[in-house]
Image: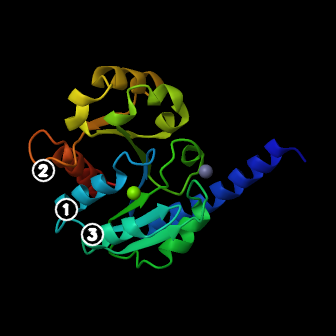
Amino acid sequence: MSVVTIERKVLQKNDELAQQNRSLFAQNGVFVINLVSSPGSGKTSLLERTLDHLNGKINVAVVEGDVQTDLDAQRVAKFGVPVVQIVTNGACHLEAKLVQDAIANIDLKGVELLVIENVGNLVCPAGYDLGEAMKVVIASTTEGDDKPLKYPAMFRNASVLIINKIDLVPYVNCNLEVLKKNAFQINPNLTVFETSCTIPTGVGTGIVEWSNWLLNKTRNS
Ligand code: MG
Ligand code: ZN
């Protein structure tokens, strides 16, 4: 049996489990996003700011995926939302089975939005359906403006692009217009937000715009 055949079988099995997750989410009326990016682009920081904004408006639960540690889950738990940490012990992406086991620890009744923070990696999370409604990819300005061209599968499979760390644009080698052009070249249907998680929430940080968009998506799903 060739390696390619084995890989196809693994992905097939994953897709079956992802569909089971999707059915479970639908039964419970849960809107699910799969947050993906390279390490250090600000997934957890964005999640903290988003939870802060959505607090009191909607019931959110979180699944955290990390190679090691529950540091991110501890950060998220401070917002008073149910959070389950998946430690992959070295594996570089989440799979539908891991998510299935994780959500068994959450009472999905009453949850309106589930955020799955994937392992920081722009490669294989693109190929693993977890049962989410959409993938949200974060590209931070510190990574430059060429990532959509170098990791096209991730940007092609995402519905939303969040360009984070816009406050650092004057200091880094990243042209926002070029980044957006590259992203739209791969996926013209992307909805784009520009955010900063380090300057206070308000006009120009993008957090309010993104959070309100997510709120509407969740309520209308
Ligand atoms: Mg994180
Ligand atoms: Zn992987």
In percent of width and height, residue 200 lies at 11, 50
Crowd tier of the residue under label 2, counting other residues whose Cα lies within 10 Å: few below 14, some 14–19, many 20 or above: some
Name the residue type under label 1: Asp
Which sits earlier in the primary sequence, circle 3 or circle 1?
Answer: 1
Task: Determine the image quadrant of residue 173.
Answer: top left
Residue marked by disc 2 = 201
Crowd tier of the residue under label 3, counting other residues whose Cα lies within 10 Å: few below 14, some 14–19, many 20 or above: some
Residue marked by disc 3 = 59
Residue marked by disc 1 = 52
Is mark 3 in CB contact (under 8 Å) with mark 1?
A: no
Going by the image, does 115 lie left or right of 57?
right
In percent of width and height, residue 41 lies at 37, 45
Q: Secondary structure at mark 3?
A: loop
Q: Residue furthest right?
A: 1
Q: Secondary structure at mark 1?
A: helix
Residue at x 76% of width, y 52% of height: 9
Q: CA distance from mark 3 to mark 2?
A: 21 Å
- Could you tell me if residue 137 is visible in this image? yes
Is mark 1 in CB contact (under 8 Å) with mark 2?
A: yes
In percent of width and height, residue 135 lies at 44, 47
Q: Secondary structure at mark 2?
A: loop
Name the residue type under label 3: Asn
In the rendered image, the vertical position of residue 38 relative to residue 79, given as above or below: above
Going by the image, does 136 lie left or right of 121?
left
Q: CA distance from mark 1 to mark 2?
A: 10 Å
Residue at x 49% of width, y 25% of height: 149
Task: Determine the image quadrant of residue 80.
Answer: bottom left
Which sits earlier in the primary sequence, circle 3 or circle 2?
Answer: 3
- Could you tell me if residue 29 is visible in this image? no
**Quadrant of the snapshot with the C terminus:** bottom left
In percent of width and height, residue 176 lies at 29, 25
